[in-house]
Image (tube, rainbow, N blue to C red):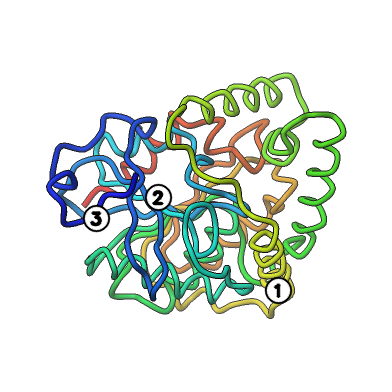
């Protein structure tokens, strides 16, 4: 299943779709990190930082494929999550250190970041602490340390998961999408796209790793506000207008406090998964932003 980075298979032409991307692994601090990549092999790579409880199969293939049409895109499982080994950190700062180690293990000296939700927390720390490593950043459905309502994300997640188990409904429908006709339709379409990959699917997050991530998110939400002026890279900020997980006012706060930010108008009748609901628009804006 796993192909070393320096093998002949790695230098072959990239898969045409995330649905068919090979799951590879690379050693990071003694643990094997699982990742998938596709798109052109030249240019600055785009590293995807996933949301709370997310694994490789939780990225919308329309977003990944759209970005990979022009950019080298790499998604990976955080330490201890999915197919990656090790113990999951219980701080965002620990996850950021792991992300940097992963990027360097692949041999890159400069990358772009797309951080979604919890991945956006991680992206902020990496951008601030590694200014030479990070060229541009996209933050979606996320907020700053100490942001309004972020400390309530763990409770919302647990409630939605329990309700989902009772109603046999994926909790992402209520957490990521609005409870309107269009929102419910977009949610069903998104879940169907997540099932398009039928082989070599990733493992779901294990309970100890989920607990560590929930603890990290709560800590982030209760931290003192961070100095976003330390992030000097260009940043594109996006979200739906009705994000019930990381309230959308955090998106506006990020855009206002980041020195070099560009705000995508909040997607109408959309929530935490706004970039998935409006994947065509988001991909077009992201590619324009990431252009050299």
Residues at discs 1 and 3 in contact (Cβ within 8 Å): no
Left or right side of 3 for 285 = right
Mark 3: give few (<14), some (14-19) or many (20+) Cα within 10 Å.
Answer: few
Which mark's residue is nearer the viewer, 1 or 3?
3
Picture quadrant of residue 286? top left
Give whichever of discs 2 and 3 has the lower sequence position. Answer: 3
User: Which residue is located at x 32 percent, y 30 percent?
Assistant: 17
User: Which residue is located at x 44 percent, y 76 percent?
Assistant: 128
Picture quadrant of residue 260? bottom left
In the depicted structure, whether residue 207 falls above or below residue 88: above
Q: Is residue 71 visible?
A: yes
Compare residues 32 and 35 and report the one nearer the observer: 32
Compare residues 278 and 209 and report the one nearer the observer: 209
Locate residue 275, reporting x and y percent. 52, 38
Locate residue 177, reporting x and y percent. 69, 34
User: Helix, strand or loop at disc 1?
Assistant: helix
Spatial CA span between label 1 and label 2: 25 Å
Spatial CA span between label 2 and label 3: 16 Å
Q: Is residue 255 visible?
A: no
Q: Hey, which residue is sitting farthest front in the picture?
A: 1
Q: Which mark is residue 175?
A: none
Residue marked by disc 1: 219
Residue marked by disc 2: 75
Locate residue 280, reporting x and y percent. 43, 28
Mark 2: give few (<14), some (14-19) or many (20+) Cα within 10 Å.
Answer: many
Residue marked by disc 3: 4
């Amino acid at each position: 299943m796993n192909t070393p980075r320096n093998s002949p298979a790695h230098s072959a032409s990239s898969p045409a779709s995330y649905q068919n991307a090979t799951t590879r692994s690379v050693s990071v601090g003694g643990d094997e990190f699982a990742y998938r990549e596709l798109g052109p092999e030249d240019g600055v790579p785009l590293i995807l930082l996933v949301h709370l409880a997310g694994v490789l199969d939780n990225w919308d293939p329309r977003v990944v494929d759209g970005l990979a049409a022009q950019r080298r895109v790499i998604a990976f499982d955080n330490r201890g999550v999915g197919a990656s080994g090790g113990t999951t950190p219980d701080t965002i700062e620990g996850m950021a250190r792991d992300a940097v180690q992963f990027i360097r293990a692949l041999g890159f000296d400069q990358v772009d970041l797309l951080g979604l939700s919890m991945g956006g927390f991680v992206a902020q720390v990496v951008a601030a602490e590694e200014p030479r490593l990070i060229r541009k950043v996209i933050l979606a459905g996320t907020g700053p340390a100490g942001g309004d309502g972020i400390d309530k994300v763990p409770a919302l997640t647990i409630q939605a998961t329990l309700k989902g188990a009772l109603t046999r409904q994926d909790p992402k429908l209520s957490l990521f999408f609005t409870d309107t006709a269009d929102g419910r339709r977009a949610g069903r379409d998104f879940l169907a796209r997540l099932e398009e990959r039928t082989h070599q699917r990733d493992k779901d997050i294990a309970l100890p790793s989920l607990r560590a991530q929930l603890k990290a998110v709560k800590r982030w939400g209760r931290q003192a506000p961070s100095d976003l002026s330390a992030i000097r890279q260009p940043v594109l900020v996006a979200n739906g207008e009705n994000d019930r997980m990381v309230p959308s006012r955090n998106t506006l706060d990020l855009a206002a406090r980041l020195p070099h930010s560009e705000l995508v108008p909040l997607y109408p009748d959309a929530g935490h998964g706004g970039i998935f609901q409006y994947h065509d628009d988001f991909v077009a804006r992201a590619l324009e932003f990431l252009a050299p």
